[in-house]
Image: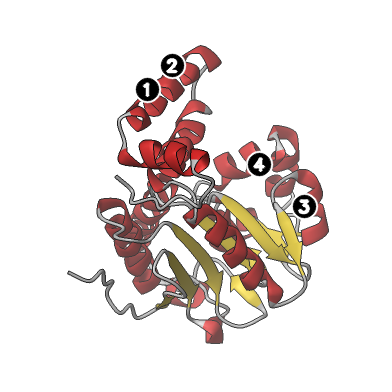
Amino acid sequence: MSFTLPDYATLALARPDPHLLVVTLNRPEVLNAINTQMGRDLLDLWTRLTADAGPVRAVVLTGAGERAFCAGGDLKERNGMDEHAWRAQHEIFERAFVALLECPVPVIAAVNGHAYGGGLETALSCDFIYAARHARFALSEVRLGIMPGGGGTQTLARAVGERRAKELIMRAQAFDAEQALRWGLVNHLSDGVAVLDDALAAAREIAGNAPLAVRQAKKSIHTGLQTDIGTAYRFEIEAYNRLVVSEDRHEGVRAFNEKRTPDFKGR
């Protein structure tokens, strides 16, 4: 059976090669703002990739157009929402953020433009971030009478430190890509549209490595940072031991000794 994903109303999917998936937030007319349908689409996508990613070994997440990666929640859709509707919509968003955080497949954010509110939270929920030099970032929800609700108080603090995160969130302070790089929020800066190519190059390197090993390493880092180092190391060893019995471990060692490129199967 061939690996297929649904057609989504708010996402554009592309497979530049069998092991890579490019996901584009595709509402450029509203700066790729997250409406209820996009929340549903993202939740479905990350859930499907968690259940069965098929041949996909790395994902690049970007936005349509050059102005914005994602402007955050769609405030026009939210205008006039009562409390019940707001909470119901946010429940969808919450599940989508958790599904992205827990997705076993590596996800690289290619931030092609501004990332505000839920847009920045989406990028922060990815494994790492490549950004265009003109991109700007902010978690400015307190100006709207709310606060970050897509994990931003946690993921931003883990990326830039507690004190800087408090200042950025409580002052609703925007910052640029150079600052994001300096603070450790962004891994790499690119010129304009080259950000997608640069992220794809990184994704191809990831996809060329043993997929089970990559996923176990991702899980070990993510889970270990939530606990003390002793417990985290024990988790790492358990993750490591699961790889010892894999076909890919045998293939990797054989290929090294035979001085050839390994042919990993994800088994």
**Left or right: 46 with respect to 172?**
left
> In the image, residue 67 lies at what x, y percent?
67, 79
Q: x and y percent of residue 37 in the render? A: 35, 73
Q: Residue at x 36, y 24 (%)?
A: 241
Do callouts 2 and 1 mark residues in contact (Cβ within 8 Å)?
yes
Q: Which residue is mark 2?
A: 234
- Please state which of the two labelled residues, at mark 3 or mark 1, is closer to the viewer: 1
Give the CA distance from mark 4 to mark 3: 11 Å
Image quarter where the N terminus lies is bottom left
Which residue lies under the disc numbered 4?
A: 159
Q: Residue at x 41, y 64 (%)?
A: 19
* Badge 4: residue crowd in 10 Å (few <14, some 14–19, many ≥20): some
Q: Position of residue 75 (x, y in %)?
A: 51, 72
Disc on the earlier residue, 4 or 1: 4
Which SS class for mark 3? helix
Q: Residue at x 70, y 35 (%)?
A: 161
Precedes in sequence: disc 4 or disc 3 = 4
**Alpha carbon separation for disc pair 2 and 1:** 6 Å
**Kind of residue at badge 4:** Ala
Colouring style: secondary structure
Residue behind mark 1: 238
Q: On the picture, is 47 further left or further right than 235?
A: left
* Quadrant holding the C terminus: top left
